[in-house]
Amino acid sequence: MKKRFLLISVALLTWSATFSQIHKMERSDSSMTGRTYTLNPVVVTGSGHHQRLKSTATPVHVLSRQEIKEQGITTFDGALTRMMPQVSMSPNSMGTFLRLNGLGNKYILILINGQKLSGDISNNVDLNRINMARVKRIEVLDGAASSLYGSDAIAGVINIITDQPTQQLVSLTSDTRVSGHGQLTENLALDIYKNGFGSYTSFSRDQADSYRINDVEYVKGSDAETQPTIVPFFTGYRANLVGQKFTYAPDNHLALNAGIDYSYKITNRPETHADITGGTDYEMRYKGLRWNVGGIYKFTSRNSLQADFTVDRFRYGKLYDVETKNYHIDDYVQSKKQRSMEGQLKAILGLMKHSTTIFGADWRKDYLTATSGNINQNAYSAAAFAQHEMLFFDRLTATVGLRLTYHETFNWHLTPKATLMYAPGNFRLRATYSAGFRAPGLDELYYHYFSVNRGKPQIIFGNKDLSPEKSNYFSLNAEYRSNMIAVSVTGFMNRINDMVIKQNIDVDAATLAMLQTEFPEMTDDQAQKLERYSLYKNSDKGDVKGVQVNVSANLFRGFNLSANYVYTYARTLSGDQWAAMERSIRNAATIAANYYHRWGNYGLNVNINGRLQSKTYYPDYEDAPGYGIWNLNTTHSFDGMKHLYLEPSIGIDNIFDKVDRRIDSTNRKYALYSPGRMLVIGLKMKIK
């Protein structure tokens, strides 16, 4: 499998280099009716200030709105998994388990316009809170980034940049996508901009039905005997997101903004039945409310002061839809409520001709309320950071950064960063070192958690004696970038100490008596089913090494090819034994070919994209096999009407009907959740 991925990458590199010459000869044709990708976009995540991609000393991956649209993608998880091989996801009823370069959710910092998205469900991210109707681009920074962004940025940073048009306009846009198994996404946006004032209203609807690949499962403890089941292989849901943002820019110096987003999501699972396993008495319901205010004042084009304040509330619990002994239909039992407040002040200064200096400070406070264990805890952190970027000898750029963080529970921490970039012509050679740290979450510190999942009790204890996790990230990058082709090769290493894990502890008679005292709500029948409980502890060390290869080329008029490959060797050390990191993938690649042509007022776009990956490692379970998924999307644009733009689309997801048809068992995990081949139909309309 590894050799096959390498051969694909080498072939694509050769093909791109050859056909870039064809494109070079055709670029002078002013009547060109095709369109090309911008291979040198503006980015902000790597350096903390706006600059061209080829100028940033820290490599950043960019997913543009154009690329996302052309692949027929309308969800955030679809954008990442189809276009970034180093990202993988596992959906479940508790959100989405996200991994970046082998490391999971809690090591990945998700930002919206540079501000942290808070709230999780048992360390699973609720990605339905991200409004794809407003996404301008998605920037992904691999590796530790704590010098700029603080705690949690050990695996990397995913920054969603939203778009607010600044031309005089009033427009209404609707973008709908429908496919099999009840999958529907609908994005509505109303934009108004006049005389420096902007109002941007959006609504998103995302839903899908639960489904199964097989109608049976293995009986627990058996690999031969099966029984019927209705437990979902994929858990259906309905999610709504409403957003409103206002902006005001009275002149070229001052820009103010304020926004609010409300999200609601509820699962859609089969109800409990007496004669078959897999049903549930309740649905999981999630609500989020996020608001922010901010502004930027530009003294000159190179000197500015920026301030932001964000409040994020997120809660979830059980909404009963089956009558039980203790609950009635429509009873709601809250499981967890989280709230965060964060303020940041940042100055971006051009103190010298060829330099950019950043000074900043931020303050953050997190709150956790959990019903089980009567937890009501909070913690704050404050930080000051500085970064200086300097150009030497016209070709050498050096960046040094340092962040000093005080955490209420874990005291002081320093996280440095240093990068070098040598830039002869269109080539870039980069070296990066960055330190990271992660303060254990309030749940890991204070949990006193008891729940029952499908009749089986679960108990988790926090640990107030935990230490912060720390990391050291190194990377070397070589890149060639022009208007026609971009080729990048990166080698990286990430080492993490004091990883926080859940240690499973077997239950004996004495322990069971202690647990029944701690959790008097646990019945005798539930206690008899309790085999082990979990305790958070610092135990493992992590070691992640890998190589990334990225190619994008405007090969000839209207045709673009992109290919991305990553080899990741991720493992953990527990005691004196190394093991593959859970859910890690050694080899993964994404490929996309896009052709666009216009005939008068009609435009045709054809996109073929695929994701290929080797097996997914589950050290305590059966590994999930590798797969290759290919998708086709075509869009047809009609813009001859004065005030109306139409863009219908039709495509096929999973062209070759690739499905993991293994039967569920207690020792089996999955990586591919596709239900099979599906027809996809969409329509985008814009009234302007």
Image: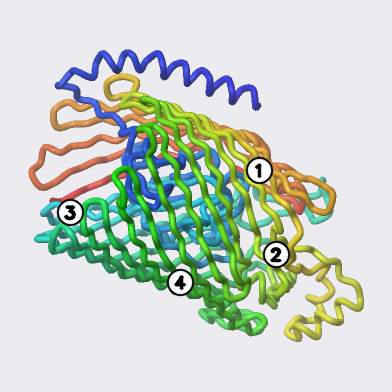
**Cα separation between marks 3 and 4:** 31 Å
Quick check: 6 left or right of 46?
Answer: right
Q: Quadrant of the N terminus?
A: top right
Q: Is residue 411 left or right of residue 503?
A: left
Closer-to-camera residue (542/274): 542
Structural distance between the alpha carbons of marks 4 and 1 = 31 Å
Tag 1 or tag 4, which sits nearer the N-term? 4
To which residue does mark 4 refer? 363
Spatial separation of the CA atoms under disc 3 and disc 1: 43 Å
| Residue closer to the observer: 325 or 403 | 403
**Disc 3 on helix, strand or loop?**
loop
Q: Considering the numbered disc 4 on the image, is that residue within a helix, a strand or a loop?
A: strand
The residue tagged 3 is: 166
Mark 2: which secondary structure? Answer: loop
Q: Position of residue 324 (x, y in %)?
A: 63, 80
For label 1, the residue is 544
Q: Residue at x 37, y 35 (%)?
A: 54
* Of marks 3 and 2, the one in the foreground: 3
* Residue type at the position of mark 3: Thr
N-term mark: 2 or 1: 2
Q: Position of residue 669 (x, y in %)?
A: 69, 48
**Mark 3 vs 4, N-terminal side:** 3
Name the residue carrying label 2.
275
